[in-house]
Amino acid sequence: MSSLSAGSAGNAAGVIEYCMKNNYLNADSATSAVKDKLLGSVPGGTKDAGYSDGSRGVLSTSNGRQLDLSNTASIKAEVKKQVCDKILAQGKSML
């Protein structure tokens, strides 16, 4: 999981949105600010395909692979939280 990262700022913002909605990340002002700043840097904003995928729980990695966080059968909640924390940290580093 150490190499797991979002392939775009839009996808990172979308995944952060998904994580906040599903209580894997605190929906506090700091987390929202990271999501909003990332989204502000994306042409098309919420219409961006990467954001749209991410907000549905689909992490699109830089190597073209996808991880569907909404698939509850194959991914445990603890792992989803770890992925969400990692994407939030990555989002902060993109700013």
Image: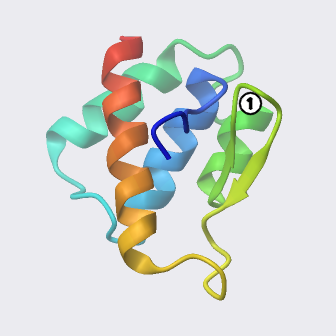
Q: Which residue is mark 1?
A: 48
Classify 10 Å Cα crowding around label 1: few (below 14), some (14-19), many (20 and above): some
Residue 45 horizontal side relative to residue 19, left or right: right
**Residue 21 rendering spot, x and y as whole percentages:** 41, 66
Residue 30 horizontal side relative to residue 77, left or right: left
**Residue 1 rendering spot, x and y as whole percentages:** 50, 47
Say which element carries label 1.
loop
**Residue 9 rendering spot, x and y as whole percentages:** 56, 22
1 shown above or below 79: above
Query: Visible in this render: residue 25?
Result: yes
Image quadrant holding the C terminus, namely top left
Q: Which residue is drawn at the image coordinates 29% and 40% (left, top)?
A: 32
Name the quadrant containing residue 27. bottom left
Q: Which residue is drawn at the image coordinates 46% and 22% (left, top)?
A: 38
68 shown above or below 54: below
Q: Residue furthest front?
A: 2
Q: Nearer the viewer, residue 42 or 75?
A: 75
Residue 1 horizontal side relative to residue 46, left or right: left
Amino acid found under the numbered disc labelled 1? Asp
Q: Residue furthest bottom?
A: 73
Q: Nearer the viewer, residue 51 or 72?
A: 72
Q: Which residue is drawn at the image coordinates 60% and 65% (left, top)?
A: 69
